[in-house]
Amino acid sequence: MNIQPLGDRVLVEPAAAEEKVGGIIIPDTAKEKPLHGKIVAVGNGTKDEEMILKAGDEVLYGKYSGTELELEGVKYLMMRQSDVLAIIK
């Protein structure tokens, strides 16, 4: 990975959206944006906010959180640690 988030930012790989619901195939335009994913990289935190998340954590985040970016054909979200709602255990 060639991206290192700065400060209190994390790089999240969103989970794949569901393709089928009860045997019905959902077109791309109707798929809901996933609200969970896996953290790929984290920053060092700031002097005011310690980084508690780490690479590999499965997390939940808000519907409109983060900035979308694409690297080597894979879509990611860059967001602040405070945008993460919970860690999935």
Image: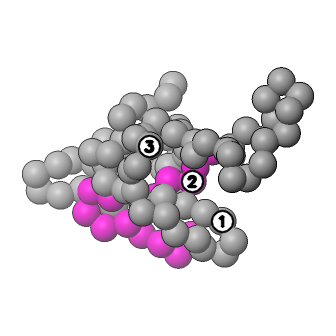
Q: Residues within 10 Å of mark 1 (few under 14, many from 20)?
A: few
Q: How many marks are shown on the rendered structure?
A: 3
- Give the farthest residue toward the right: 23
Secondary structure under tag 2 reads strand
Query: Residue 25's x, y, as percent?
Result: 85, 39
The N terminus lies in quadrant:
bottom right
Secondary structure under tag 3 reads loop
Q: Is residue 62 left or right of residue 57?
A: left
Magenta residues span 1-15
Circle 1 residue: 74
- Residue 89 versus residue 29 in the image, above or below: above
Q: Residue at left 37%, top 66%?
A: 5
Q: Earlier in the sequence, mark 1 or mark 2?
A: 2
- Residue 88 versus residue 66 in the image, above or below: above
Spatial CA span between label 2 and label 3 = 14 Å
Q: Residue at left 27%, top 56%?
A: 8
Query: Residue 80's x, y, as percent?
Result: 31, 54
Residue 14 magenta: yes
Spatial CA span between label 3 and label 1 = 19 Å
Q: Is residue 45 left or right of residue 4?
A: left
- Residue 32 versus residue 78 in the image, above or below: above
Q: Is residue 26 left or right of residue 36?
A: right
Instruction: Give the amino acid at mark 3.
Output: Lys
Q: Is residue 83 left or right of residue 46?
A: right
Residue 51 magenta: no
Q: Residue at left 57%, top 53%?
A: 13
Which numbered circle lies on residue 63?
A: 3
Which numbered circle lies on residue 13?
A: 2
Residue 72 visible in the current orientation: yes
Instruction: Give the amino acid at mark 2.
Output: Glu
Instruction: Give the amino acid at mark 1.
Output: Val
